[in-house]
Amino acid sequence: MKRLEGRNTQIIVLSRNCSAGLGTIRSLGMAGYKLDFIASVKRNDSSKICSSSKYVNRAIEIKSKNNLMDDSDKIVTELLKYPYKSEKIILFPTDDYMTSIVDNYRHVLGDRFIMP
């Protein structure tokens, strides 16, 4: 992915899987993008490896009681806290769970974000 010259593109990496999230964070960070990270976790601080990356500006953990629990409402609520901007923020889900949330809430998120 080539960084657009003169643009300050922001990306939010969404992950439930630390290894996929970390690889994505490193790749996009090295390419020069501004990154935030939102993780769905079972235990507090279980996304610490990703969230402490030097490329992550802001990290948010959404805690679930178990990995089968649907916490999509909490994730969407966090996303909607991001302000409207003239240049939309890019959502980058790194696993099937986060991709399904983006897809299921496309009608709510579409005005603020660029989605796959």
Image (tube, rainbow, N blue to C red):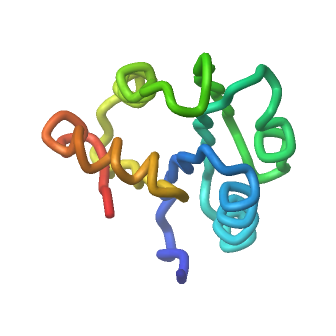
Q: Residue at x 67, y 55 (%)?
A: 21
Question: Could you tell me residue 91's position as x and y percent?
Answer: 42, 52
Question: Could you tell me residue 76's position as x and y percent?
Answer: 36, 28
Q: Residue at x 48, y 54 (%)?
A: 93
Quadrant housing the C terminus: bottom left
The answer to whether residue 85 is seen in the rendering is yes
> Which of the two residues, 33 or 53, is positioned nearer the viewer here?
53
Position of 34 compared to 77: left or right?
right
The image quadrant of residue 72 is: top left
Question: Could you tell me residue 92's position as x and y percent?
Answer: 47, 57
Question: Could you tell me residue 26's position as x and y percent?
Answer: 75, 65
> Which of the two residues, 93 or 36, is positioned nearer the viewer here?
93
Residue lying furthest left: 107
Q: Residue at x 67, y 73 (%)?
A: 31
The image quadrant of residue 48 is: top right
Picture layout, residue 62 above or below residue 86: above
Position of 13 compared to 26: left or right?
left
